[in-house]
């Protein structure tokens, strides 16, 4: 019997691959920095940004000053565009995301969230329309842990007070999350309703896992 469902956030509950897209390439353009120079610092700091060691503001200031193009106006513009792009993702949810979460609640199933995210994303998630549905949340920026570290999965299970064998994990498959969830005893399935060909999405279909084509399909396997 499934007592809890733990979700990934990006490309599972929401997608960042619909407009407005605002990743490193777009930030480098707005900063007036060649992308390779921008990415030298941006990508190198990705783990630190993910596990709470550095904020968006701090990394942007470092990049801009290193490239001798810092201004408060420029930095604020980039920050606001980044925040807006992340907020917008919650405005074009798959139409069945909220009905699926509501039905899980009606059935008494606990709902968890594990997300690898940066400082600005952690803040936006907590203010989002989806946040009230979660019974337990583990955000990498807050926890100092990121997927696929088994510790972040175990931490969420502990918050939900359920055993791994009683939990279903649903994610798009990035960050080896499905393998990690399965390794500690959870049943893992791949959410593919946002997956599209020819995009920069981090995951592709994984045939070794059951694939769910629509959010409401979850209700058929709990």
Image (tube, rainbow, N blue to C red):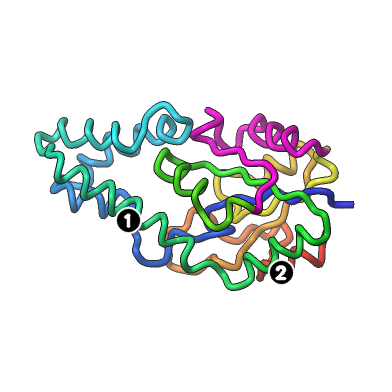
Does residue 119 appear to the left or right of 40 in the view shown? right
Rendered view: 109 above or below 65: below
Task: From the viewer's side, name the closer residue of 136 and 219.
Answer: 136
Q: How many marks?
A: 2
The residue located at (12%, 39%) in the rendering is: 71
Helix, strand, or loop for circle 2?
helix
Residue ranking furthest to the left: 68
The residue located at (60%, 38%) in the rendering is: 138
The answer to whether residue 138 is magenta is yes
**Where in the figure is residue 139, as x and y percent of width and height?**
55, 38
- Magenta part of the chain: 133-162
The residue located at (13%, 48%) in the rendering is: 32
Q: Which residue is mark 2?
A: 216
Instruction: Indicate which disc, 2 or 1, sits on the residue closer to the N terminus.
Output: 1
Quarter of the image with the C terminus in it? bottom right
Task: From the viewer's side, name the closer residue of 62 and 204.
Answer: 62
Q: Which residue is mark 1?
A: 22
């Amino acid at each position: 019997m499934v007592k809890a469902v733990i979700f990934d956030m990006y490309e599972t509950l929401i997608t960042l691959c619909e407009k407005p897209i605002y990743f490193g390439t777009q930030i480098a353009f707005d900063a007036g920095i060649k992308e390779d120079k921008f990415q030298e610092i941006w990508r190198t700091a990705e783990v630190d940004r993910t596990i709470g060691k550095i904020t968006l503001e701090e990394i942007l200031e470092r990049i801009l000053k290193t490239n001798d193009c810092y201004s408060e106006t420029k930095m604020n513009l980039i920050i606001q565009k980044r925040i807006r792009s992340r907020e917008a993702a919650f405005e074009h949810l798959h139409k069945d995301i909220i009905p699926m979460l509501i039905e899980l609640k009606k059935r008494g199933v606990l709902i968890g969230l594990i997300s690898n995210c940066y400082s600005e994303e952690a803040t936006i998630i907590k203010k989002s329309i989806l946040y009230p549905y979660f019974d337990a949340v583990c955000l990498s920026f807050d926890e100092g842990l990121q997927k696929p570290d088994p510790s972040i999965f175990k931490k969420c299970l502990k918050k939900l007070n359920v055993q791994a064998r009683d939990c279903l994990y649903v994610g798009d498959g990035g960050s080896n999350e499905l393998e990690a969830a399965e390794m500690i005893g959870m049943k893992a399935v791949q959410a593919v309703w946002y997956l599209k060909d020819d995009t920069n999405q981090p995951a592709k279909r994984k045939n070794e896992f059951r694939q769910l084509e629509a959010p409401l399909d979850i209700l058929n396997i709990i």
